Amino acid sequence: MRQVTVTIPDDFYETFISFFKHIPDVSINDNTVNEVPLWQQEMVLERMKNAKPEDYIPLKDALKELDKKWL
């Protein structure tokens, strides 16, 4: 038996799953526990697209700021 991982659009999910449920010996594992919602992915991509180089800070500086705030 083989294992397949598939990424599909949210609006096609139900159709896709209903098709495979009818195949004998098929196991469907819906691993959406840590999935980032599509709207949030789009928002982040839009922010990254619109960001200017001067908006970014070095990782070392960002980690220092987080340490000051949370440690």
Image (tube, rainbow, N blue to C red):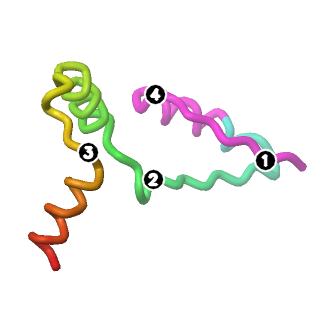
Residue at image point 64% right, 51% down: 28
Task: Please identify, in this view, whether the residue under mark 3 or under mark 4 is nearer the observer.
Answer: 3
Q: Which residue is mark 4?
A: 9
- State the SS at label 2: loop
Separation of residues labelled 3 and 4 (CA atoms): 34 Å
Q: Which mark is residue 58?
A: 3
Nearest the eye: 18 or 44: 44
Residue furthest right in the image: 1
Q: Which amino acid, by three-letter code, is at mark 1?
A: Gln
Above or below 5: residue 16: above
Describe the element under mark 1 as helix, strand or loop. loop
Q: Do the residues bearing badges 4 and 2 touch, measured as CB atoms within 8 Å?
A: no
Residue 32's label in the rendered image is: 2
How far across and down, in percent of the image, does residue 68 sit? 11, 71
Q: Amino acid at mark 2?
A: Thr
Q: Residue shown at 81%/52% (left/top)?
A: 25
- Looking at the picture, which amino acid does disc 4 mark? Pro
Mark 3 or mark 2: name the one nearer the start of the chain. Answer: 2
Please tell me whether residue 25 is drawn above or below residue 40 in the rendered image. below
Dot 3 falls on a residue whose secondary structure is loop
Q: Determine the CA span between mark 4 and mark 2.
A: 13 Å
The residue stretch that appears in magenta = 1-19
Residue beneath label 1, please? 3
Residue 14's spot in the image, x, y percent? 49, 35
